[in-house]
Image: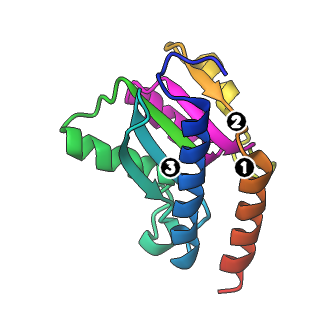
Amino acid sequence: METKTDITEERVVELIRLCMSEVDVAISEGNVPMACIITDMSGNILARAHNTQNADNDPTAHAEINALRKLGKLKESRYLDDCVVFSNAETCSMCMSACIKAHIRTFFFGAPAEPSMDPWITMADVAEKSKLPLEIHGPILGEECKNQISQGRSMISKK
């Protein structure tokens, strides 16, 4: 996997697994099983978050949006150039657009987009319309992430 970052393949896998750990927190809180980690170009974690839509009664409280908000406050800037997004699943169009607005150009994801995603706009679709050149890598640990998401959805639907 060729990328403009200094992040090794081993570190990429480790970061996707850390996203999966964050998903466990989302599930335990009754939220959608999605998580995000934002790093610098060397793979150092700057922010991590999980989906809190159900807990916050906020349809925009996706993992990536929550991580962007945290990091924006920490950096005191809405521009997050030279940051990298890792998520346990393909980022939705809302979150992808927000990341682009923050000038993030590099993305790694676990599970591929779910057919139930609405609107059905993949990361590649958004990237095609972006004025910024983007790097998108995935799926990484796709089956593991997909299984965790499926199990998590099943668990929260029973609550």
Residue at (47, 65) in percent of width and height = 52
Report whether residue 90 is seen. Answer: no
Residue at (58, 73) in percent of width and height = 27
> Tag 1, which secondary structure?
loop
- Residue 65 percent location from the top left of the image: 43, 48
Residue at (33, 48) in percent of width and height = 69
The label on residue 117 is 1
**Label 3 Cα neighbours within 10 Å, binned few <14 / some 14-19 / many ≥20:** many
Residue at (53, 68) in percent of width and height = 26
Q: Amino acid at mark 3?
A: Cys
Left or right of residue 118: residue 135:
left
Left or right of residue 101: residue 54:
right
Q: Earlier in the sequence, mark 2 or mark 3?
A: 3
Residue 105: say if magenta: yes
> Tag 3, which secondary structure?
strand
Q: Are marks 1 and 2 in contact (CB under 8 Å)?
A: yes
Span of residues in magenta: 88-112
Nearer the observer, disc 2 or disc 3?
3
Circle 2 residue: 121
User: How far is disc 2 from disc 3 in space, using C-alphas?
Assistant: 19 Å
The label on residue 36 is 3
- Residue 123 percent location from the top left of the image: 65, 32
The label on residue 158 is none
**Quarter where residue 81 is shown:** top left
